[in-house]
Amino acid sequence: MPWKTLDDMDFARKRALVRVDINVPVEDGEVTDTTRIDRIIPTVEDIRAKGGKVILMAHFGRPKGQVVPEMSLEIIAPAVADALGLPVTWVNSDYGDAVAEMTDDEVLLLENLRFNPGEEKNDEAFAKRLASLGDIYVNDAFSAAHRAHASTEAIAHLLPSCAGRLMAEELRALEKALGTPDRPVMAVVGGAKVSTKLDLLGNLVGKVDHLVIGGGMANTFLAAQGIDVGKSLCEHDLADTARDILAKAEAAGCEIVLPRDIVVAREFKEHAEGQTVAPDACPADAMILDAGPETVAYINQVMEAAKTLVWNGPLGAFEIAPFDAATNAAASHAAALSKAGSLISVAGGGDTVAALNKAGAADDFTYISTAGGAFLEWMEGKTLPGIAALG
Ligand code: ADP
Ligand code: MG
């Protein structure tokens, strides 16, 4: 690995500036989901066990370089203290004496970095000011690594730097899935639109052996082959792009799997009557809302021969039953194969994680990335500035 981890650093009597993602949902001043806070515990505990002091740095919401009281990290500090079982001292944007006076028993939490306009501008002066507060920089916020900000990029050039536990775990899982995967490797890409996932599809056709295209974006591919998709969600203006992707896949020896049967309905509402038909048989007044059972059977067959699966995007309009059927069935199969040890499965994306949870499949996937935008940019094959700066 080109980046260092906590194991490579000497934290004894040092102050570690740890960039974390604790951008949690808050209602009426209370944190309603502590998942992101809970996930930073191993890094904080390890640094302290190695004799270091921890200063947490984070953003909260989008204050856009201004002080917005409702977005103060002071609100989150008690939940961080609860999770860590340690006193957590919130430090206002002046920083000042709190750092010099820090005791061994406390953890500091700096005010929302995005209150300072220098943060999102990757400003050197702001990075220097942050760097002056500590001795070692630790980045544990993979989900913020696609942004070149002062606390994710510039600061890494100013101090000895390494990845925290969560970041290292995420990087290892992702590297295993697409960097040096066990083959055959397959990807499932679904969701609403091709336009949001063009770079992702372009990158995957050069890397995977099988690419399943599902969801609304499959309609664009069907239409590009001259099929009438009725009232389905479809980006007709992307027909050429879709054909380019098919040609690129063929040249790269990547099998593209499109729906072999489709579920159509005239209304998009709970328990609407769905009908399974051939891909070219969508009635003019109907919409394609899911893949059919024959498609799922084929996807599952490819999965059984595969060693690695990367998944982003549901196969249908999963929010509303019965159009969650294909997503649920394929997700359950991937979960079972992963549990049995024959498949390494990695999934990410906001709706994808929700869909896999809904299917009861998420727990058995090898790795679920909660990183959203950073996960998608990684799937696009982009170099994430926050990771590059650690190297
Ligand atoms: P992610 O957030 O995991 O990256 P997307 O946002 O790309 O995923 O896609 C999720 C959305 O795609 C869901 O809201 C789902 O309803 C929608 N979708 C999937 N298939 C269809 C379809 N056939 N028609 C309309 N919408 C669809
Ligand atoms: Mg989404």
Image (tube, rainbow, N blue to C red):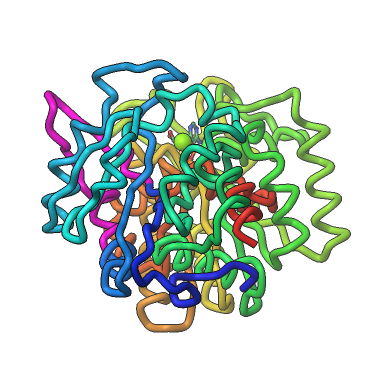
- What x and y, as percent, mark residue 90? 22, 38
Residue visible at 53% across and 20% down? 285
Quadrant including the C terminus: bottom right
Is residue 251 placed above or below 182 in the rendered structure?
above
Residue 326 can be seen, yes or no: no
Verify whether residue 311 appears in magenta. no
Residue visible at 73% across and 63% down? 207
249 or 381: which is nearer to us? 381
Residue visible at 49% across and 62% down? 163
Verify whether residue 28 appears in magenta. yes
- What x and y, as percent, mark residue 26? 20, 31
230 or 59: which is nearer to us? 59
- What x and y, as percent, mark residue 346? 48, 63
Q: Furthest-right residue in view?
A: 251
**Residue 365 relative to residue 159: left or right:** left
Residue visible at 57% across and 39% down? 147
208 or 275: which is nearer to us? 208
Magenta residue span: 21-41
Is residue 301 placed above or below 311 in the rendered structure?
below
Quadrant including the N terminus: bottom right
**Residue 318 relative to residue 279: left or right:** left
